[in-house]
Image (cartoon, helix red, strand yellow):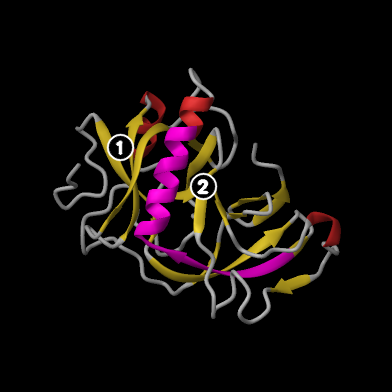
Amino acid sequence: MQARGLMTDLNGADQKIMYMPGGVHTINCGLAGKAAVTVTLQVDREGASALNADLADENKRNAPQRALFDKDHEQKEAMAWPTELFWSDKPQPGIYASAEMSSLGKEYTEGKVVRAFSGSFYTDAELPKRSEVKAGATYEIKAGKRGSPQNPARIIGIEFPFAGTFTNNPAFREILPLWAKAGKEGSREGTEEKAGLRSQEAMQIRRALITTKEKT
């Protein structure tokens, strides 16, 4: 699908939504709901392919249920139903989602009630296990380990069924607004973000919170 300079084409059947901006991002986020951790993440074409493959696998395995985007991580109504996750260089480099908007999603985006998007996904970062996390502690991944600045973590899959959320408090501050036009409303406010990501060690992360959950 081509965006024609719009990140979302509100008149089309499927909308193009930026899932996360491309590049290397050092992310500050909560850990296990009681601590904090700093992780460096690589967002690229490889990650887009991994997300799309996992989206297809999860939808097939859980049929007739499907992955969805909700609102503010409430895990309730669907704002949109993602059909594909892919890399695009336009309007800005990043991972994008083609999604079927629900009537509620259209109402919120056309009315500009919500501005941005935050994904929920897995990475292969070497994060502490939940049993090892101490309340109030701040963790940093050791130099050279997966998820450190010297060895950025890779994206390996989506959360199911809630694969992301429409929000006014986005995970990546650089993410384009839901109604952004190329070159006009893209935000470039730095690379340290409060984000939602999850690790291969079964760390579930939403926005600024990480809790342990097995991915089956």
Residue 110's label in the rendered image is 1
Residue 216 vs residue 7, the one in the foreground: 216
As displayed, is residue 91 above or below residue 75? below
How much space separates mark 2 and mark 1, taking CA atoms?
29 Å
Specify whether 83 is left or right of 73: left
Residue that carries the numbered disc 2 in the rendered image: 157
Tell which circle, 2 or 1, labels the residue nearer the N-terminal end.
1
Q: Residue at x 62, y 54 (%)?
A: 200
- Is residue 53 in the magenta section? yes
Instruction: Measuring from the top left, give residue 94's x and y in whole percent.
Output: 34, 59
Q: Residue at x 72, y 66 (%)?
A: 36
Residue 37's label in the rendered image is none
- Is residue 81 in the magenta section? no
Q: Is residue 26 visible to us here? A: yes
Q: Residue at x 63, y 57 (%)?
A: 208
Instruction: Measuring from the top left, give residue 42's x and y in whole percent.
Output: 46, 66
Instruction: Measuring from the top left, give residue 135's x and y in whole percent.
Output: 85, 63
> Which element carries disc 2, helix, strand or loop?
strand
At label 1, the amino acid type is Glu
- Residue span colored magenta: 36-57
Disc 1: CA contacts within 10 A as few (<14), some (14-19) or many (>=20): few
Q: Quadrant of the C terminus?
A: top right
Q: Residue at x 58, y 59 (%)?
A: 124
User: What count of labels does the image hold?
Assistant: 2
As displayed, is residue 114 above or below residue 142? above
